[in-house]
Amino acid sequence: QVQLVESGGGLVQAGGSLRLSCAASGRTFSGYTMGWFRQAPGKERGFVAAIAWSGGRKYYTDSVKGRFTISRDNAKNTVYLQMNSLKPEDTAVYYCAARQGSIYDDWGQGTQVTVSS
């Protein structure tokens, strides 16, 4: 298992930027695909971005392409989500997750991101 702790959430006005961090502990972190998900009030949790263990493959949901950037630093056991040009519809609890296979087994506690108009 990998333990994940998100940080960096907060309140930001529309058009602003925020960087989320996910600190991981566990001996297999460097071998995990890491992902970011979010859940807005009254909605199901959805995929935001993912990055392969090597950092070479990145995936984004269409609504954040060109605005969000996922990255990882395996030496620091940390994955990041740089969020630019934030919109009110980005408001959600953001979760960091890790997987080795087809499913994400390890999840952080979430960090709240609120984007005001």
Image (cartoon, rainbow, N blue to C red):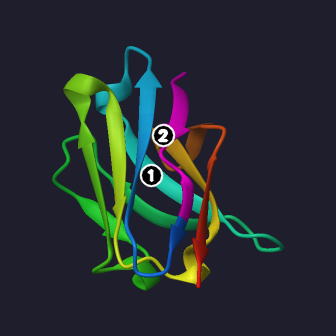
Range of residues picked out in magenta:
1-11
- The answer to which of marks 1 and 2 sits earlier in the sequence is 1
Q: CA distance from mark 1 to mark 2?
A: 6 Å
Report x, y in % for residue 106. Answer: 58, 35
For the residues bearing labels 1 and 2, Cβ distance under 8 angstroms: yes
Say whether residue 6 is magenta.
yes
Report crowding for label 2: few under 14, some 14 to 19, many 20 or more residues within 10 A (C-alpha): many
Query: Of the residues shown, which amino acid type is indicated by label 1?
Result: Gly
Image check: 50 left or right of 2?
A: left
Q: Which of the image's four quarters has the N terminus?
A: top right
Report x, y in % for residue 43. Answer: 77, 74
For the point 53% across and 30% down, which residue is it? 4
Quarter occupied by residue 74 = top left
Furthest residue to the top? Answer: 27
Query: Which element carries disc 1, helix, strand or loop?
Result: strand
Residue with the mark numbered 1: 35
Query: Which element carries disc 2, helix, strand or loop?
Result: strand
Residue 92 drawn above or below residue 99: below
Report x, y in % for residue 54. Answer: 19, 42
Report crowding for label 1: few under 14, some 14 to 19, many 20 or more residues within 10 A (C-alpha): many
Query: Of the residues shown, which amino acid type is indicated by label 2?
Result: Ala
